[in-house]
Image (tube, rainbow, N blue to C red):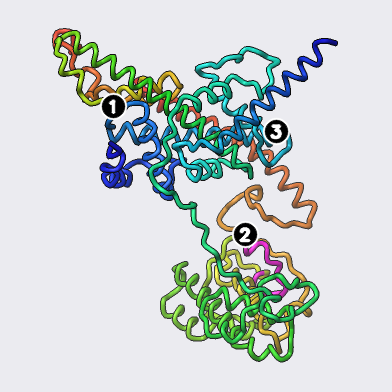
Amino acid sequence: MKDGGLENKKELENSKKQSKSSKFRSKNDDFSLAIAKVAVAQVCESVGFQSFQDSALETLSDVTARYIYTLGKSATLSANLTGRLESNVFDVIQGLEELESGLGFADASDVNRCLANSGVIRDIVHFVGDAADVPFAYDVPRFPVVKEREGMGSFWEKGEEPHGEHLPSWLPAFPDPESCATQSTVGNGTMSGSNGVKTGLVGVERKIERPLLNCQKQFARNGNLRDSSCGAGDSAKAREASNSNPYLAAPLQFREKEVDVSPVVLPTKLSNEVVLRDSVPENHSGEDQVSVLETFAPAIEAMKSGLCEYDGSRQKNVLYNQRPTVHFKIGIGKKSLNTAPYFVSKNKDIHKIAYWFENSNEKDDRKRRAEIFSEESMECSHEPGQL
Amino acid sequence: MSHNPQSSDGKHDDDSTLSDFLASLMDYTPTIPDELVEQYLAKSGFQCPDVRLIRLVAVATQKFVAEVASDALQHCKARQDAVVKDKRDKQQRDKRLILTMDDLSKSLREYGVNVKHQEYFADSPSTGIDPASREE
C-alpha cells in the first residue's frame, strides 16, 4: 500500500533531472524533495488515496516545500520587524494566519483578538486530535551534512610569531618563501614579492629574490602577450622584444630613440594620466605629424621606470629627480576637447575655450538627437503593424 | 472592575492552552519529518532553537496537505459518481482512487495556487475553426 511512493521513486528521480530548475529548487534540493514526496504520499494515503500520478505527486510536494518556506519567511519577517533575530510562537502564528487568510479562519475579522487564541491554532488542535499518528516511513539523517574544513593554519596554531605588531596571531600564517619560489603562478609570486618589499627582512631577501625574478618574468610574459594581442608592429620586432625583455632593459636616456621597441598601443586614458617627466624635444618640434611611436615612447619609458621599482636594489629613478615636469596633450584623431574625459589643463584660457566648445557641442548634440528621432519615426512609419 | 479578573483569567487560559498544546506536540509525531521542515525553514532564514515550533510548522503543513488531498479526493469521488450515474455500472465504483493532476489543480485553485495545464496546443490561432468562417 505504501508502494505508491516507493515504486516510482527511481523513475521520479530520473524525471527530476529533466525537470526545470527554478530559483527555489536548486540542484542540491534533490534529496529534500524526495523526502517531501514520500511524506506527502503518506499523508495522501492516510486521507484515502490509493495511488498517485507522478506529476501530481511532484507538484504537491513542491507546493508543500514552498508552504514551509513561505511560512518560515513570514515568521522571520515579523520577528525582524520587532527587532528580533529569533522567531517565537507568535511570529509563526502570524505567518499561519497570513497563509490561511485566503480561505479564512474563525475570528479572522476580530481586530482585537489575541494571537494565542487564534482560530488557526484551534483548527490545528482539532486536526491533531482527529488525525491518526502516522510516522514517517524512513529514518531521516541530519542533513545537509556540513563538511569540516581544514583551518588555514593561523600563526597561533603553527606556533609562529607574526612578523609585526600589526599582524594578529589568529590570521593565517604566511606561506614559506621556498615553496613559493617553486610555484609558477602569478598570485603566489606577487604575494611573496610584496612581502619582501613590505617586511624588508635581511635574511629573507635572498630567498625572495627568486620569486621576485619569477614575478618579473610573469610581468614580462604578460607584457609580451599584450604586445602580441595588440597586433601592432612586425612579428620580427615582437620576437626581438621578447628575447630582450623590454621591461628589464635600461631606460632610455635623453635624446635617445629606440626604434626596436615594439609599439604598444596604449589606451588614451593610460597615456593621458601619466605625467611625463622627461623633456623629449621631438614632441615639441614643429612637426605636424607626430609618429605614434614617438608619441608613446615617453609613456613606455615611464612604465618601464615604474616597473623597475620592484627591483629592490640598485637602480634609482633618475627620471623622477632631474627632469622638469611637462604637460603633454595627446589628441587622437579629431576629437573635440569636450570628449576627452581625462583632459588635464592648468591653463585657464584653455579652460574657457573648452567651455565655449562645450556649449557649441551641446547644440550639435541636440541637432544630432533630433535627426536620430526623425529617422526613427520614419522607420516606424514604414511598419504600420507594429506598435 | 469585574471584567478585569475575567479577562486576565481568559488570557491565562489562552496561554495555557497554547503551551499545553505545544507540549502535547512533542508526543505526537507528524508525518512530515522534522529534518525536512528544518531544512526549508533554514533556507528561508527562520531561526529558532525551540523544537516545539518546528513541530508546530510540521503539523500545520501536514494539515494543509491533508486539506488539499481531501478536496482532491472529493473531486475524484464526485467524478466517479457522475460516471456511475450515466452508465449505472457499480463495478466502476471499485476503481482505485488516483490523485490526478486534474483534481489537484482544482483543489489547489481554492488555495490560491495555479497549476492549471493547457488544455490543448494549436498550430495557429485559426486552427479548428470552420473553413467557412475563416477569413481568407
Mark 1–mark 3 distance (CA, rounded to whole Å):
41 Å
Which residue is pictured at 53% across the width and 83% down the height? A245
Of all chains, the one bearing label 3 is A
Three-letter amino acid code of the residue under disc 1? Thr
Three-letter amino acid code of the residue under disc 3? Leu
Which residue is pictured at 50% across the width and 77% down the height? A221
Instruction: Indicate left or right for A144 with A255 as reference.
Output: left
Secondary structure of the residue carrying numbered label 1: loop
In the image, residue A291 sits, relative to residue A369, either above or below, namely below
Q: Is the same chain shared between marks 2 and 3? A: yes
Looking at the rendering, the stretch of residues picked out in magenta corresponds to A270-283
Mark 1–mark 2 distance (CA, rounded to whole Å):
66 Å
Mark 2–mark 3 distance (CA, rounded to whole Å):
48 Å
Residue B74: within the magenta? no
Instruction: Indicate left or right for A348 with B29 as reference.
Output: right
Three-letter amino acid code of the residue under disc 2? Lys
Q: Which residue is mark 2?
A: A269
- Is residue A318 shown to the viewer in this render? no
Residue A280 rendering spot, x and y as whole percentages = 68, 75
Residue A70 rendering spot, x and y as whole percentages = 53, 33
Q: Quadrant of residue A355?
A: top right
In the image, residue A36 sits, relative to residue A239, either above or below, namely above
Q: Earlier in the sequence, mark 2 or mark 3?
A: 3
Q: Which residue is mark 1?
A: B100
Secondary structure of the residue carrying numbered label 2: helix
- Is residue A82 shown to the viewer in this render? yes
Q: Which residue is mark 3?
A: A81
In the image, residue A317 sits, relative to residue A146, either above or below, namely below
Residue A150 rendering spot, x and y as whole percentages = 56, 69
Secondary structure of the residue carrying numbered label 3: helix
Mark 3 nearby-residue class (10 Å; few <14, some 14–19, many ≥20): few
